[in-house]
Image: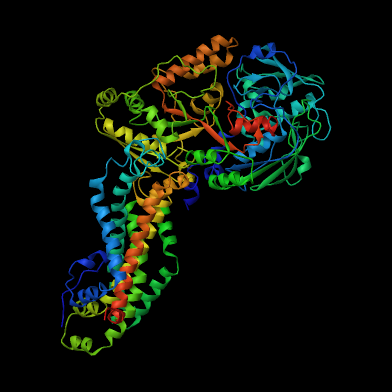
Amino acid sequence: MTANENSGRNQEKNGPWSNPYLTRRTWLAGAGGLLVATSIAACSGGAPSPSGLSTGGKPVRGGNFRLGVTGGGSKDIMDGQNAITLPDISRRLTAWETLLNRDDNYQIQNDGLAERVDSDSPTQYTIHLRQGVQFHDGKEMTAEDVIYSLQRVGDKSNALNAYVMTASMDIANIQQLDKYTVRLPLKTPDSALLEKLANVAFSIVPTGYKPFSGDPSTQIGTGPYKLKSFTPGQQSVHERNPNYWRGDGSPWFDQVTISNFADSTAQVNALLGGQIDAMTDVPQAQIASLESRGSRIVSSQNGFWLGLCMNIDVAPFDDERVRQAFRLIVDRQAMLDQVASGRGKIGNDLYSLNDPAYNADLPQRQRDISQAKALLKAAGHESLTVDLNTTNGAAGQVSIATVFAQQAKEAGVTVNVKNLPGSTFYGEDFLKYPFSVDFWTPFPYMLQVPLSSLRDGLYNETHWPPREGAGSNFADLYSQALAETNTEKRIEIEGQMQKAEYEQGGYIIPFFPDKIDGHAANVQGFSPSKLEYNLGNFGHGFRNIWFA
Amino acid sequence: MSQTVAAPPLPESADTKAPSGRSSTLLARSLRLWRSRIGVAAVALLVAIAVFGPLLAPSAPDKFVALPNSLPGTSGTVFGTDYLGQDVWSRFLTGGGEILVLAVVSTAIGLVLGVAIGLISAYSRNAWDDVLMRGMDVLMAFPQIMLVLVAVSLVGPETWIIVLAIALTTAPRVARVARGAAQPVVERDFIGATQAMGMSRLRILFGELLPNILGPLMVEASLRLTYSIGIIATLAFLGLSGNPNSPNWGTMIQQNQTALATQPWGALLPIIAIALLTVGSGLIGDGIARAAAGIDRERAA
């Protein structure tokens, strides 16, 4: 019955995560802003230093860090290059690392497993590996492992989530130049390549790696913690990797324990009772009570978004005047206040907030009921009634629909909110609704577009771009941006793309709610972060946090 | 001897004059008990809130008045705001009608159906009795909430299916009671006399049998109403009501439960109301049962 779906109102990652459609939000872990291909090469290696050490004091060793995560279940998996649930994402970050990393400002840094990645030409990249990095079993990481890792993602039969991102890569012809150098040829120019390599879905696994099937000792990576035990749906225990390559003393904990929680109330109680040291996704209503009882809140503007999706192929949204009217109906500040208690940032119907290419030059859209009414009248919809389909998937997914319905009344629009069970909402009608609410874990613009804003995108909820008229050249612009090696020019093209979506698109993105997590007062090192997952990607893979 | 058919009595009709002499004396007698008076007062208060509440609400139930989960007093709110920054007091005042109307309507339909089936069973004394009663047994084998949930999951949270499902699952329980109470009456001489007089079967059932079992039926009605309120509130709590933001008491509890530690009123007010309503109608039924059993006389004397 539907009780399960409904119980997750305040936990964005509850019940519906078991639905395959939802895995898209998890499958690109570690995505980020548009970073210039060439600038990566320019930033030379240097000594990597842990980022995010913002809360004073010198890190100290020791202790068992216990994390509570919601959203998992018996479908939890462990694969260095794949994840389905939020607990999977947190566990993957204990043991596996990427060639490039992102910092708390969402900038790609070359403090990952590669010293640098050079762009030789628009269709050829060279990866220079860091030397002396050991896997958990003592074997050194070499070019062979990197080639195996990329080919594993690119092998369709492995059914890894990031497979679609390898379309531009010439996987079969990856070459080993020497023990620490890999040449990656592309089939088509791909200016988003470095963003992909900085994504945890492209983590490096040792040659011959297989996902978890009962033996913890097979789960080998280069990361700060080694797997000791794992029971899907319940708990995993990770031991400190004494040979961790950074040489700065990290990781700091002797052990990390990750436990699944069924709901956020249990998580809050466990945090207050001292059974866990940190938790994901604190419900708005419980922030105050956590703070008043000595726990700490980390509030991050990570670009997570909820969108009202208008299907531009069907009436009444095939008329751009109706879409424009609906965008003018929204009182964004009131919606942010109501749905997220004001914790967040006003949106302008554009996604990828933390991407350097985010088009902040477009005028902030304001509520204008008389203009909305005039547009609806011109479109012949003076009294319009529409269904707005939603589900209790992410925090706010139903509330945003409710508030929109209330705000639309003033413009003479009747909105019937249909709160569907998760399995129904993400069932066969998903992507066909005229009007619906969905949510996304943030992606860089150039990675988000092929997912949701191109006709052949896997999750194109708005059926963008239009087949003719203004905006119909969107896909061409996208190809141009992919092929453009000059960063400034590329950002300019992306700006045009966003302008088209801003003016004609099917999304209403009223605000970006903050990501709000909690931890005990004695945990040091957590800080607000623009990284896409909870607690600043779990304290940068559990290596920048320690007990005071 | 014969009387006009009384409409299926409902607890809130307790203070109105029922046409049946029998039932009115029973009600009047039950009102001599404190438990009945408390029950009637509680139900009357909540019915008054449901009826007049919307007129007294200081703001529209879906109006944004202050930040979510604000404490009482913020922006002039009496009981603070709820999970969406809407006025808890206004939503409480407007949220009773839906639950009450649905509960009364579905219970009434269930009563009419159940009484008809029970009387026919008791009067027929043949194979029909077995067929009808075994059918009722099958329906009763499933917990009421489960059957209703199945129906709502199949069709969707539409109001008509909620009413229908509750009515159909209420009927077997009423039928059992009606049949049980009617059976000894059927054996009595005056029924034989009416048959001899050539009275129509319908008149015998509803003109002669029914008035003689009103006591237990009224008890059953109040009990069934209590259950219906509980089920409707449960469905709303599970999010299975038409509009996810309707100011329904059950929905309010679900929406505001996470704030219980910081701003309890959004959940507490509807919890108190539903508790009062069910306890009230339970007390009324209990009072009638005691009056029928003659317990009231000992106490009142």
Would residue A132 appear left or right of A378 to someone viewing this image? right
* Residue A380 picture location, percent across and down: 25, 28
Q: Among all residues in the image, which is located at the extreme bottom?
A: B189
Nearer the observer, A287 or A239: A287
Note whether residue B289 is visible.
yes
Would residue A53 appear left or right of A339 to someone viewing this image? right
* Residue A227 picture location, percent across and down: 74, 40
Nearer the observer, A316 or B103: B103
**Image quarter for residue A533?**
top right
* Residue A450 picture location, percent across and down: 53, 25
How many numbered circles does the render carry?
Answer: 0
Would residue B32 appear left or right of A9 to someone viewing this image? left
Task: Identify the image quadrant of the C terminus of chain B.
Answer: bottom left
Note whether residue A310 is visible.
no
**Residue at x-position 58% and y-position 29%:** A532
* Residue A249 picture location, percent across and down: 77, 28
Task: Identify the image quadrant of the N terminus of chain B.
Answer: bottom left
Task: Say if A95 sits above or below B134 in the image.
Answer: above
**Residue at x-position 26% and y-position 88%:** B188
Nearer the observer, B167 or B262: B262
Task: Say if A89 sits above or below B111 in the image.
Answer: above
